[in-house]
Image: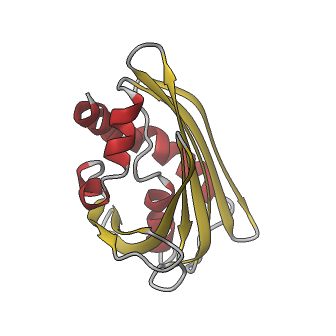
Amino acid sequence: MIGLRPLLATLWLLLPVSLVLADSVEQVRARHKHGVYTVDLTMVLNAPVANVQAIVTDYDGLHRLSSSIVESRRLPPTATDPERRRVVYRACFLIYCFTAIMVEAVHFPEPGRMLSIVEPEGSDFKAGYSEWEFSQVGENQTRVAFHSQLQPRFWVPPVVGPWIIKRKMLTAAKETGIRIEKLAR
């Protein structure tokens, strides 16, 4: 039972802060190899691209997107990273709860694309990154493609981890998808 806390933290942390199920999940896949978790998710949100991007980049307001986010805030810039954020997650399973911190540098390499890179110092992760791509679909819909690789500092069971991550993403995502769409409309 000791391994449940780290497993649950990883499940919630691998659920993208701002990317979740709305009306249409086109792809979802979770993998584990050599202590690194990879998640791919593609979905369509019923909201305009600009609005979705504004919600996703409101670092002080990310707690509005998921009940697992207990704190989020913009951090001071560094010489190399003008945008940074800190997100605190809390995940519970039965009576076991776990809190994990992720500090990231956020970059916008081109319009419609966001890249966040984990800063190991101050995070509960050794390494990691997430890529978001936002594109317009129809008049008021946004396709969001998300890819993430995370290497937690804590142990997660390799056999069941990816299966549970995928299942959690599909079930917990509705809450956040509804919140994003509601805020972005």
User: Eyeballing the image, is 30 above or below 27?
Assistant: below
Seen in the image, is 114 located left or right of residue 92?
right
Residue 116 point in image, percent of width and height: 53, 61
Looking at the image, which residue sits at the far right?
34
Residue 152 point in image, percent of width and height: 57, 74
Looking at the image, which residue sits at the far top?
138
Q: How is the image coloured?
A: secondary structure
Seen in the image, is 46 located left or right of residue 61?
right
Q: Quadrant of the C terminus?
A: top left
User: Eyeballing the image, is 94 above or below 16?
Assistant: below
In depth, the one of 83 and 95 nearer the eye is: 83
Residue 51 point in image, percent of width and height: 33, 34
User: Eyeballing the image, is 143 above or below 76?
Assistant: above
Which residue sits at x=65%, y=61%? Answer: 37
The image quarter containing residue 184 is top left
Residue 178 point in image, percent of width and height: 29, 33
Which residue sits at x=45%, y=64%? Answer: 8
Which residue sits at x=32%, y=62%? Answer: 94
Looking at the image, which residue sits at the far bottom?
121
Which residue sits at x=38%, y=34%? Answer: 50
Report the label total.
Answer: 0
Seen in the image, is 9 located left or right of residue 27?
left
In depth, the one of 185 and 161 nearer the eye is: 185
